[in-house]
Image (cartoon, helix red, strand yellow):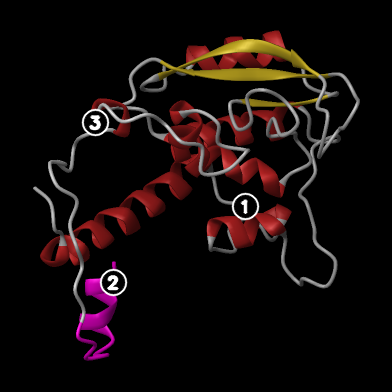
Amino acid sequence: MAILVNAERGLGCRLTVVPCAGWRRGQLFSETGNLWMAPSLAIPHFDTALLYPGACLFEGTNLSEGRGTACPFEMIGAPFVDGARLAAEMNAKNLPGVRFTAAYFTPSASKWKGEACEGVQLHISDPHVIRPVRTALELLYAVRAHWPQEFAWKTRDGVPHRFISLLTGCGAFEDDDAIPPLDRLLAQWEAESAAFARRKAAYQLYE
């Protein structure tokens, strides 16, 4: 990223990036033989890190993203959710690399602190094929469809936009009457991701 910015912004910095030794682009951290060191109290496990890019979107809603439990970002829920119903629906989607079980938990911190919640726990079945953002969006749309009266977007004092807009980097969820269908949003984000993949290819350091 530093090389890309230096080149595309014409900064002209005398930049040296020291590459990692012995790492390949398709290699997961769990395949390196190194011990996982939690970069945050909210990312205690490697599976948490794999789920986080999508599960963090729930921070922009009134659903608990599992903060205040032993499995942050691996459990999603709220008091108004039917966990068994939601787990069955999500498993029926056959999303790659992930399975869902009903979850029952009481967060000790953050949203719904001290209140009994229901929802789902995400279990990674294949870390190489899971699509965390797609998985989270499928889950978010399902909750919003089934519990539209209880579901809410999180706002922040003094910030003109919904928190979800800061998390996604776009305004797709600003207007409830104009939220795009899931398939259209996923197609747009996939296209943007592919465009960035082509753009960064010239600067990649690893095979």
- Between marks 3 and 1 in the image, the one whose residue lies nearer the viewer: 3
Label 2 with label 1: CB-CB less than 8 Å = no
Quick check: 119 left or right of 20? right
Name the element at disc 2: helix
Q: CA distance from mark 2 to mark 3?
A: 24 Å
Provide the residue designation for mark 3.
Answer: 32
Amino acid type of disc 1?
A: Ile
Query: What is the span of residues highlighted in magenta in the rendered image?
Result: 1-14
Position in image of residue 199 (x %, y %): 20, 66
Name the element at disc 3: loop
Q: Dividing the picture into quarters, in which one does residue 181 lie?
A: top right
Position in image of residue 68 (x %, y %): 76, 31
Query: Is residue 101 shown above or below 18?
Result: above
Q: Dividing the picture into quarters, in which one does residue 144 lie?
A: top right
Label 2 with label 3: CB-CB less than 8 Å = no
Q: CA distance from mark 2 to mark 1?
A: 34 Å
Provide the residue designation for mark 2.
Answer: 2
Position in image of residue 42 (x %, y %): 62, 38
At x 87%, y 32%, the residue is: 113
Q: Badge 2 local density, few (<14 within 10 Å), some, or many (20+)?
A: few
Q: CA distance from mark 3 to mark 1?
A: 41 Å
Provide the residue designation for mark 1.
Answer: 179
Residue 199 lies within the magenta run? no
Position in image of residue 38 (x %, y %): 51, 37
At x 28%, y 27%, the residue is: 128
Question: Disc 2 or 3, which lies upstream in sequence?
Answer: 2
- Between marks 2 and 3 in the image, the one whose residue lies nearer the viewer: 3
